Amino acid sequence: MATPATLIYGDGIGPEVVKATVHVLEATGVEFEWDEQQAGLGAYEATGNPLPDATVESIERTKLALKGPLTTPVGSGFRSINVALRKRFDCYANIRPCVTLPNTKGPFEGIDLMLYRENTEGLYTGIEYRDDRNDIADAVARYSRKGCERIVRYAFEDAIKRGRKRLTLVHKANILKETGGMFLRIGKEIAEEYPQIQFDDRIVDNMAMQLVIRPQEYDSIVTSNLFGDILSDLMSGLVGGLGVTGSANIGEEHALFEAVHGSAPDIAGQGIANPTAIIRSGEMMLRYLGENAAADAVATALHDVYAENTHLTSDLGGTASTSEFADHLAARVAQIVNA
């Protein structure tokens, strides 16, 4: 039976990389019933709404979405649709694996890190004030016990499922004593329930330094919204960049899987974009659905194709187009599935 899922092609290179990902997912034999919807700049230009009601209604119904990159205006215009979707469907856990692939430009080998980012609170609540008289702007970083507890508990539970051994909580409790202090205190309380996982904590600035000096010493990381946004991109840089790392947004009822890189309008339509990031997000979607054999096939095939180094896109020094890369990868996935 096919799984209903909302499919959002997105802006810029979105349609190209999403099409490639659907092709690879189909090669696993897992069937999806795709409901194609719009969001982002293209939706805004077509309908006057960057997040049409039909898109929201589709995700509400399917409870599952695969989404290409969206363009968000900088400094003005509509707010981030990515943030709006996470908040609308209470997808409180952002999961960002960073795993090395062969023949990438990352500075390290053998990186295998997981980051769990609180996805709905902190500074991303968008609570801001403007004092025009004194030319002052304020932003409120809102933390709740519920928000802290559920992301930390999710991180522990998922670490156990994945066979992880260590979880590091990242904070700024030395300065932000109420918000950061609350996050750290709750983390320590919950850690007592999971003695099988080694638990420690790091101040965020020190963690950033640690990750660029000795990332191999770390395993899983849990942190707040803003720090997670920053560190997840840093970690992607360790394995070759945003173009090769996937992302999942998980809630109690809904899950959104997306590429976190930009829409790259400068290369849109040229057929040269690397679809690896959203393909890896598709792999995460398969695992979320319990299709672990299919997910393993995608992960193994990606590693094999990168190791072969014959069908890589131009950003990796290859000559393959987006569709050629996807065709080769899909064929490898099918070979593994049918072996």
Image (cartoon, rainbow, N blue to C red):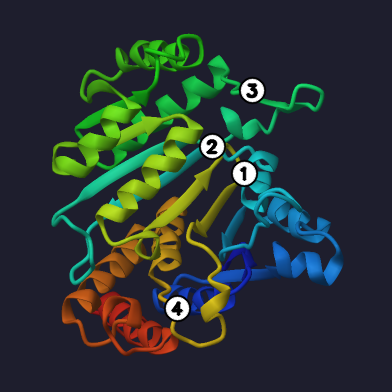
* Closer to us: 227 or 332: 227
Residue at 69 percent across and 54 percent down: it is: 59
**What residue type is disc 4 on?**
Ala
Single out the mark in the foreground, 3 or 4.
Answer: 3
Tell whether label 1 touches label 3 (CB within 8 Å): no
Instruction: Estimate the spatial distance between the alpha carbons at disc 3 and disc 2, rounded to whole Å.
Output: 15 Å
Whether residue 225 is situated above or below residue 328 in the rendered picture: above
Q: Is residue 145 left or right of residue 283?
A: right
- Quarter placement of the C terminus: bottom left
Label 2 amino acid? Answer: Asn
Which amino acid lies under the numbered mark 3 shown in the image of this protein?
A: Val
Q: Return the residue at label 3.
A: 140
Q: Residue 86 carries which label?
A: 1
Read off the residue under disc 2. 119
What's the amino acid at mark 1?
A: Arg
Q: Measure the alpha-carbon separation of dots 4 and 2.
A: 27 Å
Mark 3 or mark 2, whichever is nearer to me: 3
Q: Are marks 3 and 2 in contact (CB under 8 Å)?
A: no
| Quadrant in the rendering for residue 161 | top left
Q: Nearer the viewer, mark 4 or mark 2?
A: 4
Q: How far apart are marks 1 and 4 (CA)?
A: 26 Å
Q: Is 125 on the left or on the right of 279, as rendered? A: right
Q: What residue appears at the point 37 percent right and 15 percent down from the top-left corner?
A: 190
